[in-house]
Amino acid sequence: MRNQSVTREPPVVVLPEIDDLVSMEKPREVLKEAENIVRLMFDETSFDFIRSVFDDILTLFAGKYPDFKRCNTRFHDLQHTTDAFLAMARLMHGAVVEGKPLNETDVFLGLIAALLHDTGYIQREDDHRGTGARYTLIHVQRSVEFMKLYFDSRGFSERDFKICSCFLECTDLDVEVCDICFSNESYRMLGQMLGTADLLGQMAARNYLEKLIFLYYEFEEAGVPGFASELDLLRKTADFYEMAKVRLDNDLNGVRHYVRAHFRERWNIDKDLYEAAIEKNVAYLRFILNEHPEEYRTYLRRALVKEWN
């Protein structure tokens, strides 16, 4: 009997997703992973100060920080901040792996700026008009103002404040990063990383598409023009991805590619998992828009949007 050769298909490699590596909805797990990443760069460092700033941000978003209300924006919520925080840690680690000379102070300032970058959405206790969403168009300016208040209370130097305020400006989509005055190129790179982390963190999130419904109502309250309905925002989000890639690769100088070195070094995965997650989200959004535009809420993958019914 003649042996027959059997053609075997190569095994399908299933890559983990961002949430498979870290439980992104659990702030303490995010903080723990950020500490792990920092120790890959500086194994002898103390993480206590970053941990204390992180705790202050949890207190702020929970409405327990003196003179401030709890966070009441559903898109720009605590998870968005912790998503950006971890993305920032990953970008900086990837840069160090690739030979960029970041020191411990640089990394700590980058992490602190990430934690503070959307504090401008938080209302003061005596602010009784609407929600923090009404500050959408000026939230970066307000975040810088809160950072000044916070830095003064924690004893940061004026130099640290100026450095981090420039980092925050890089998250403003209306600002040309090349126009921001940085004192050196390392700080410029860190600013570009924060602008990148802000975009990657939100667009790669597993619940990004569902939360776009909340973003529509934040925009509506703020009077942001150009979005006629929830569905209109979903349609324009698909196009926003292409515009975001231009900003990521031009204004933000392509620093997003450092995350691949991070995933390779930290997890032995030689792939940009943020890019993979974003493309998966956008592909699913296009499927909804093309095949089920009248039932878009039904096809969003979680139950968050039901709260708006």
Image (cartoon, rainbow, N blue to C red):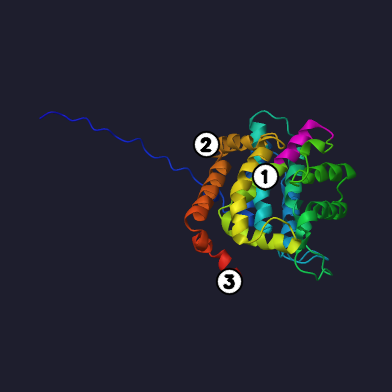
Q: Work out how far the residue at label 1 is from the one at label 2, CA to CA, in angstroms.
A: 21 Å
Q: Work out how far the residue at label 2 is from the one at label 3, CA to CA, in angstroms.
A: 43 Å
Residue stretch in magenta: 183-193
Magenta region includes residue 185: yes
Marks 1, 2: nearer the viewer: 1
Q: Which mark is residue 197?
A: 1
Marks 2, 3: nearer the viewer: 3
Q: How far across and down, in percent of the image, does residue 160 sit?
A: 84, 43
From the viewer's side, name the closer residue of 153 and 116: 116
Magenta region includes residue 244: no
Instruction: From the image, give the main secondary structure of the stretch colored magenta.
Output: helix
Residue lying farthest right?
158
Residue drawn at point x = 79 percent, y = 64 percent = 123
Q: Are there few (<14), some (14-19), or many (20+) residues within 10 Å of tag 3?
A: few
Question: At label 3, which amino acid type do we have?
Answer: Asn
Q: Are there few (<14), some (14-19), or many (20+) residues within 10 Å of tag 1?
A: many
Report helix, strand or loop for mark 3. Answer: loop
Q: How far across and down, in percent of the image, does residue 101 sit?
A: 73, 30
Camera sees residue 133: no
The residue carrying mark 3 is: 309
Above-or-below relation of 95 to 279: above
Quadrant (top left/top right/bottom left/bottom right) for the N terminus: top left
The residue carrying mark 2 is: 268
Report helix, strand or loop for mark 2. Answer: loop
Q: Which mark is residue 91?
A: none
From the viewer's side, name the closer residue of 18 and 212: 212
- Nearer the N terminus, badge 1 or badge 2? 1
Above-or-below relation of 118 to 95: below
Q: How far across and down, in percent of the image, does residue 194 sit?
A: 72, 43
